[in-house]
Image (cartoon, rainbow, N blue to C red):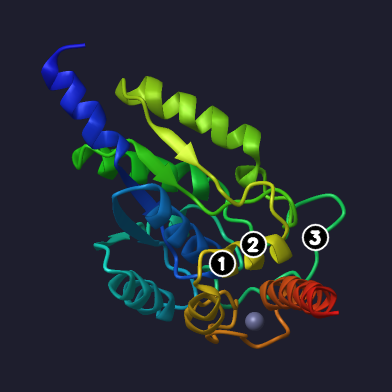
Amino acid sequence: MNTKETNKSMQNNSSALVLHSGGQDSTTCLFWALRQFKEVRTLCITYGQRHSLEVEVARKIATGAGVPFQLLNAGVISHLAENALTCPKMIMDEDKPADSYPNTFVPGRNLLFLTFAAVIARSYGIRHLVMGVSQADYSGYPDCRDTFIHSANVTLNLAMDEQFVIHTPLMWLTKAETWALADELGVFDIVRNETLTCYNGILADGCGNCPSCKLRKAGLDEYLAAKQRRQKTEQG
Ligand code: ZN
């Protein structure tokens, strides 16, 4: 390895690009990345989803964390196929239908997101990408699975002749464990009060009724109950 290459790899190893939507998961990933890497940038991708408030939430969190915020408009995604996140007229599935995915599934989204992120990261000399997907306790979206992420990683490396590394710190965590991670990182309050996960566009604890709020609340209740039990044991 010559000096130029050494410098390049050193530089690349110290910085990461986080795909950040302003939700609980990607915000937890942002603070995870700040622990792992010297320099972190965020990329917020819009695609005509229902709530543009997401962008402002993501911008505020990134600014608060002192990291550069970049916005990419990928509105073309909403023109490709109908789904409940981009079509205001569609009523969202509350549960996963037995033989298909909920209509909140946006086909191809994470593949496109990773491709956009990799191209942008490359332009900054960044090879580490961080994404808040998890296959442990969600709706079973295929592009949140570990196998897909590995496959996308290989494809991106082949497509650009690069050595990207996609990090998915939440891949095997339940929602309760994701809350635990936020707490461990010292950002429990930020994640609880400043993120937007609700499909109805309500900040923090949200509307309480949409599938996303239900999942978030169930995990939070489970985590807080476990924490309380632990504290009682420690005191007693
Ligand atoms: Zn909600």
Which residue is under mark 3?
96
State which tag comes first along the sequence, 3 or 2. Answer: 3
Label 1, secondary structure: give it: helix
Q: Position of residue 187 (x, y in %)?
A: 50, 72
State which tag comes first along the sequence, 3 or 1. Answer: 3
Distance (Cα) linking label 3 and label 1: 27 Å
Q: Nearer the viewer, residue 43 or 89?
A: 43
Q: Nearer the viewer, residue 205 or 55?
A: 205
Q: Is label 2 within 8 A of ligand 1 (CB to nearest ligand atom)? A: no
Label 3, secondary structure: give it: loop
Left or right? Give the position of 10 relative to 156: left
How many C-alpha atoms fall within 10 Å of the one at disc 3: few (<14), some, or many (≥20)?
some
How many C-alpha atoms fall within 10 Å of the one at disc 1: few (<14), some, or many (≥20)?
many
Residues marked 2 and 1 touching at CB (< 8 Å): yes
Q: Residue at x 62, y 85 (%)?
A: 205
Residue type at numbered disc 2: Thr
